Amino acid sequence: MTVYNFCAGPAMLPPEVMKKAQQEFLDWQGLGVSVMEVSHRSEPFLAMVKECEASLRRLMNISDEFEVLFMHGGGRGQFAAVPLNLFIDGLPGVYVENGIWSKGATDEGKKYLPTHAVDIRCDAEGKFDILPVSAWQLPENAAFVHYCPNETIDGIEIVDVPKHSSAPIVADMSSNILSREINVDDFDLIYAGAQKNIGPSGLCIVIVRKSLLTRPGLVKPAILDYALEAKQGSMYNTPPTFAWYLAAEVFKHLEANGGVKAMAERNAAKAQLLYDYIDSSDFYSNKVASHCRSQMNVPFWLKDDALNATFLAEAQQAGLVALEGHRIVGGMRASIYNAMPLEGVQALVAFMDKFAKEHS
Ligand code: PMP
């Protein structure tokens, strides 16, 4: 039976990449040892990371104005690294809030600098909604403006990019990097934990404008220091080598399959199929306003919570796994990142329809 894994993260990876990793698990590049067993400073590993960065630069069209860092510590590591590196005495860190992860970033930021939270939620009539970017009240003085373009738990995605007259725009793209085309030049810092659209957990991609690396910021752990990591080729300490290697394989796979443009088209089709079905049903609901629904994470609720356990058990039997909603919001959540094929979403919709008919 084909199993489709809807986990929000660590999420499914492209099967072709997993098979390749399996084939070369014990013998990487004919060295007779695993990629996990070679020095990060050895020639083959250095060549691999060079190509990995070049591949990501091609996929996202990243210019030389930006440094690409491969760091530890996932998304939450960056919740700390951003204020520590971008601190300016006397200026607040501005945090746009519209869900659980953006609020999490504020909570971490508060430890290091004064914060100014901008709440963009404008829920009405039982809908989760947010203000359009043009209506955000961003203060003029800011060390940076942080926001989360895709709230993994709330299922809210912001496609337009905010602008600020002086402060750098920082985006937590942990759950939607590489899922749609963006103009990197619209941002000053993009970060993403790898475990959704890139590879295994343990690696975090940081794309940072070089001009920001001269900010002294605050005293910080060396492994969270952007300027130091840039100088050291992201190898100040031993990097998560296996995660880095798998990320490189995922990037290669994306390039060989039409790049971000092709992913974006596929993702739009998958999301539309699922949202259209949910909207057409009176058994399921998604409460997010249609203009800001996430293409990556689709939370949905059954009309009767008492059926949740049965839904999950039967879905599992049908090969549809990890559909349980986040413990904070309940219900269900289908995460349909790049690696999820259209067939997976078709199978989910067919199962949901059958389940609704049997339990209405
Ligand atoms: N930001 C977002 C948008 C996330 O979805 C997550 C994790 N799901 C995080 C940050 C935290 O990432 P990590 O667990 O890698 O620290």
Image (cartoon, grey):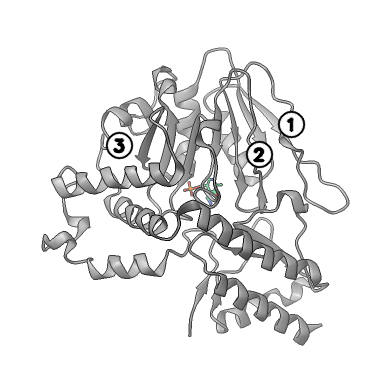
First along the sequence among labels 3 and 2 = 2
Vertical order, 301 against 219 (above or below): below
Who is closer to the viewer here, 53 or 357?
53
Percent across and percent down for residue 355 are 71, 82
Who is closer to the viewer here, 359 or 133?
133
Percent across and percent down for residue 281 are 80, 72
According to the picture, the residue beneath numbered tag 1 turns out to be 134
First along the sequence among labels 1 and 2 = 1
According to the picture, the residue beneath numbered tag 2 turns out to be 160
Q: Amino acid at mark 1?
A: Ser
Can you tell which mark lies on residue 234? 3
The structure residue drawn at horizontal position 41% and vertical position 27%, both measured from the top left corner, is 65
Q: What SS does tag 3 mark? A: loop
Q: What SS does tag 2 mark? A: loop
Q: Confirm whether residue 331 shows in the render.
A: no
Q: Confirm whether residue 346 shows in the render.
A: yes
In which quadrant will I find the C terminus?
A: bottom right
Residue 135: quarter of image: top right
Percent across and percent down for residue 124 are 86, 47
Q: Amino acid at mark 2?
A: Asp
Vertical order, 14 against 86 (above or below): below
